[in-house]
């Protein structure tokens, strides 16, 4: 499979994904409006789906950066990182060097976003800049540029944002239902109302499962792409090893967790950790490191 075939497949999947989520949001809105006898919910849901689809497509890069507190930096601010990004962009065949953003966090992590290689950005944490060696930073940046080249960034951020919209819509319905939003007439159709409650609980889970199906394979492909770009699989393997051993937790927006090179919530404990592992947006770091170190270029 070539880089061009991956690009074409991801462009196709992006449109399918957008249509799927629009259909899901409209279906949820219809069921919720019918159960509450309120047509405004259906019209609002349709408008919500269309507006967020457009926002996710055109402004996904800015939304992802804003949600995670990333600030744009110039070449003079991080000259070594910027030079690496410039050189790798040329090597990767990306026509325009992506914008560089910085997140102030001791955690080691990074992500990329953007709807096309010409309109893209890479964000790194201050912890990554401070704790990784130059070759390891190069491996991480190559991984992110591989995502950009393959149009993974557009696919994953749209999946994350629209899954978040489904969760928000379901949450709004549950709040309206539990805090007296139903009129007396709507209470007569108990079966429809019960179905709507079950749907509101399960729809966000289903939306996240779809998001996960999009995300996991992309990480293995980007790892392989980084190894080919740098001709040094060990640079990314070593970086992933340090990331997995890092004790600091990145305060990231959950809906964008699939964008990061490693799951920002992997260190949480208890029920949250169990749920995080069950719905992990990333394959196990150990598997990624093992595959990288087993590569022969």
Image (cartoon, grey):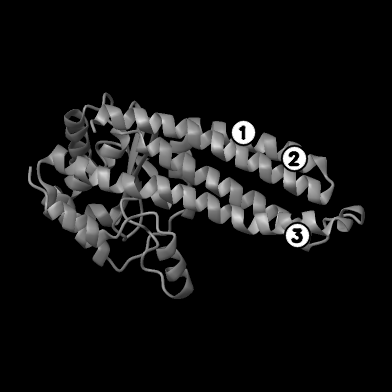
At mark 3, the secondary structure is helix
Q: Quadrant of the C terminus?
A: top left
The residue that appears at 23% across and 59% down in the rendered structure is: 287
The residue lying at 16 percent from left, 52 percent from top is 292
Report the residue marked by disc 1: 51
Q: Name the side, left or right, on which 133 lies relative to 111.
A: left
Q: Position of residue 102 (x, y in %)?
A: 34, 46
Q: Are marks 2 and 1 in contact (CB under 8 Å)?
A: no
* Image position, residue 69 (x, y; %): 44, 49
Query: Badge 2 is on which residue?
Result: 42
The x, y position of residue 179, in whole percent, is 79, 62
Q: Position of residue 231 (x, y in %)?
A: 10, 41
Residues under labels 2 and 3: Cα distance?
Answer: 18 Å
Residue under pointer 3? 194
Q: Compared with residue 95, is residue 1 higher up or lower down, i.e. above or below? A: below
In this view, the mark in front (2 or 3): 3
- Looking at this view, is 56 or 33 the one in front? 33
Q: Residue at x 80, y 46 (%)?
A: 34
Which mark is first along the chain, 3 or 1? 1
- Count up the numbered dots: 3
Identify the mark at residue 268; answer none if there is no mark: none
């Amino acid at each position: 499979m070539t880089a061009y075939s991956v690009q074409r497949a991801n462009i196709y999947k992006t449109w399918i994904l957008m249509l799927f989520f629009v259909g899901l949001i409209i279906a949820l809105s219809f069921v919720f409006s019918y159960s509450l006898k309120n047509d405004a919910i259906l019209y609002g849901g349709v408008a919500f789906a269309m507006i967020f689809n457009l926002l996710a497509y055109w402004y996904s890069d800015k939304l992802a950066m804003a949600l995670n507190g990333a600030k744009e930096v110039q070449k003079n601010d991080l000259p070594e990182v910027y030079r690496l990004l410039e050189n790798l962009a040329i090597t990767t065949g990306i026509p325009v060097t992506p914008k560089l953003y910085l997140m102030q966090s001791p955690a080691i992590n990074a992500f990329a976003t953007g709807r096309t290689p010409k309109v893209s950005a890479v964000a790194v944490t201050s912890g990554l800049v401070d704790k990784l060696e130059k070759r390891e930073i190069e491996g991480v940046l190559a991984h992110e540029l591989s995502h950009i080249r393959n149009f993974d960034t557009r696919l994953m951020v749209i999946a994350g944002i629209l899954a978040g919209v489904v969760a928000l819509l379901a949450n709004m319905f549950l709040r309206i239902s539990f805090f007296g939003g139903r009129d007396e007439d709507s209470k007569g159709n108990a079966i429809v109302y019960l179905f709507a409650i079950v749907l509101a609980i399960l729809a966000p889970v289903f939306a996240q499962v779809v998001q996960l199906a999009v995300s996991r394979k992309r990480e293995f492909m980007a790892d392989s792409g980084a190894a080919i770009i740098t001709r040094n699989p060990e640079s990314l393997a070593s970086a992933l090893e340090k990331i997995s051993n890092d004790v600091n937790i990145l305060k990231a927006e959950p809906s964008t967790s699939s964008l990061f090179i490693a799951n920002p919530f992997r260190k949480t404990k208890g029920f949250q950790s169990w749920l995080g592992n069950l719905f992990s947006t990333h394959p196990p770091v150990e598997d990624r490191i093992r595959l990288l170190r087993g590569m022969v270029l």
